[in-house]
Image: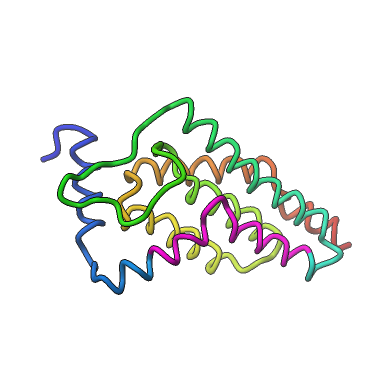
Amino acid sequence: MFRQREDLERHLLRLARTCGHTPRAERAVARFSRLGEHGAVWMAIGIAGGVSRRAARPGWRRARRAVGAAYVANTALKLAVGRRRPELADLPPLTGTPTGLSFPSAHAATGFAGALAYSRLGAPRLPLYGLASALAYSRLYLGVHYPSDILAGALLGTALAARLAPGRDALSEATA
């Protein structure tokens, strides 16, 4: 059915840009998506976790560093790859972006880094991954990323958090 990956990506992007769209929904998703700009919501969650759990502060600090590392690595990859943001002639993007570069998605990278890093410290996994997934999908809905941008960002963030954020053993040591 789809001869090339690009055909599939454009088809999925077009679906995301046309299903469930009303002016009200578009405004709400655009506002929601701003939470993920530059990893801001993930840093805020990390700060709150560190403040509320004094004994585990070093773990929360390392977890925030993993989110920051995901953002920095994502930015470097964007510059190295140089993939332009999607353009659908009849469906312009519904929000602005800091750059015209698309691959990978920083919303996905910081979101999935935060979800893994903070859940390893005992924060509830389902809401964290729900937020990460919703923020990542918002970028497709708004027409500023291809699906592979989202997937690559999620994999990048997960890999960096797995490497840099404390695991269950570190949590046990911090609370012992």
Which quadrant of the figure has residue 87? Answer: top left
Q: How is the image coloured?
A: rainbow
- Please tell me which residue lies in front, 164 or 103: 103
Quadrant in the rendering for residue 81: top left
Q: Quadrant of the C terminus?
A: bottom right
Q: Main secondary structure of the magenta part?
A: helix
* Image location (x, y in percent) of residue 46: 69, 60
- x 14%, y 33%: residue: 3
| For residue 49, above or below residue 98 | below
Frontmost residue, 98 versus 110: 98
Residue 31, placed above or below residue 77: below
Q: Position of residue 134 (x, y in %)?
A: 43, 62
Q: Is residue 31 above or below residue 155?
A: below
- Residue ID at (54%, 31%): 76
The residue drawn where x is 25% and y is 49% is: 13
Q: Residue at x 45, y 44 (%)?
A: 105
**Residue 2 place in picture, x, y as percent:** 14, 38
Specify the segment rendered in magenta: 30-50
- Compared across the picture, whether 104 is left or right of 93 comes to right
What residue occupies the far right of the structure in this picture?
176
Question: Which residue occupies the extreme top position in the image?
Answer: 80
Magenta segment includes 45: yes
Side (left or right) of 102 relative to 62? left
**Residue 171 image position (x, y, % from top left):** 78, 57
Image quarter (top left, top right, bottom left or bottom right) of the N terminus = top left
